[in-house]
Amino acid sequence: MSEDNHSKEWEKYEETIDKFIQIIAKNMNLYGITSSVGRLYGVLYFSDEPMTLDDMRDALEMSKTSMSTGVRALSDMKMVESTFKKGIRKDLYQSEEDWYKSFTSLFGNRWRKHTESNIEEAEETIEELKRLYESTDDADLKQRITNDMDRLEYAKNYYKWLMKFIQVIESGKIFDYIPKNE
């Protein structure tokens, strides 16, 4: 095989991988992750070796600060981890290869925060409506408040159910119901 053909094959390979990294980045938006952080994850995922922030900066042509922020975000979501290699003094990072683990961690973290907040907001709203109910003489307003407190109790019950669902995902029990494809 000529060197020119060999070079073209490698170029085609890199284009193909880059295309898939763009798909990863685009899909990460579903989880509230910016496409630049998604691209960073994709580059780490397809790297055969752990990478330094400088390696990432060179691969993505972004600032070292952006790489550091992105790695921290991915690390918080348990999608990358720092690693050690003898003889290298700089911090090294590699992607979490288990996408099931990454999903359960990411899903759990994101949904837990929002669900806990929604439960708290519903409880605060109920308390405020109770005070208003006690202070008013308007029968129509009292009926409206009663109806809305019923709705809020329903919402709270839903959010409590959702917390159970989140626990099933975070604990890994979800895989008892929907096994991993391996």
Image: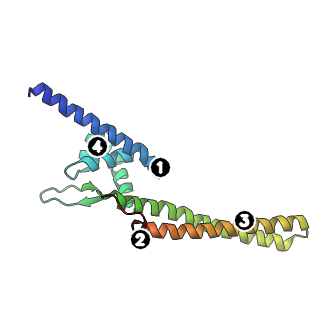
Please tell me how crowded label 2 is: few (under 14), some (14-19), or many (20+) other residues with Cα within 10 Å: few
Percent coordinates x, y for residue 164 in the rendering: 52, 71
Residue, disc 4: 57
The span from disc 3 to disc 4 (Cα, nearest Å) is 51 Å
Check residue 151 in the rendering and tell me which mark sits there, or answer none: 3
Q: Could you tell which of marks 1 and 2 lies nearer the N-terminus?
A: 1
Q: Could you tell which of marks 2 and 3 lies nearer the N-terminus?
A: 3
Q: Could you tell which of marks 2 and 4 lies nearer the N-terminus?
A: 4
Please tell me how crowded label 1 is: few (under 14), some (14-19), or many (20+) other residues with Cα within 10 Å: few
Is disc 1 placed on a helix, strand or loop? helix
Q: Could you tell which of marks 3 and 4 lies nearer the N-terminus?
A: 4
Q: Where, quadrant-wise, is the C terminus in this rendering? A: bottom left
Residue 139 falls in image quadrant: bottom right
- Specify the amino acid type for callout 4: Arg
**Looking at the image, is mark 3 or mark 4 nearer the viewer?**
3
Is disc 4 placed on a helix, strand or loop? helix
Q: Are marks 3 and 4 in contact (CB under 8 Å)?
A: no
Residue at left 36%, top 55%? Answer: 74
- Specify the amino acid type for callout 1: Leu
Q: Where, quadrant-wise, is the N terminus in this rendering? A: top left
Check residue 30 in the rendering and tell me which mark sits there, or answer none: 1
Residue at left 58%, top 70%? Answer: 160
Q: In this image, 62 relative to 126: left or right?
A: left
Residue, disc 2: 171
Q: Could you tell which of marks 1 and 3 lies nearer the N-terminus?
A: 1
Percent coordinates x, y for residue 14 in the rendering: 24, 36
Can you name the residue that lies furthest to the bottom here? 134
The span from disc 2 to disc 4 (Cα, nearest Å) is 35 Å
Residue 51 in the image: above or below residue 155: above
The span from disc 2 to disc 3 (Cα, nearest Å) is 30 Å
Query: Residue 143, can we see it?
Result: yes
Percent coordinates x, y for residue 57 in the rendering: 28, 43
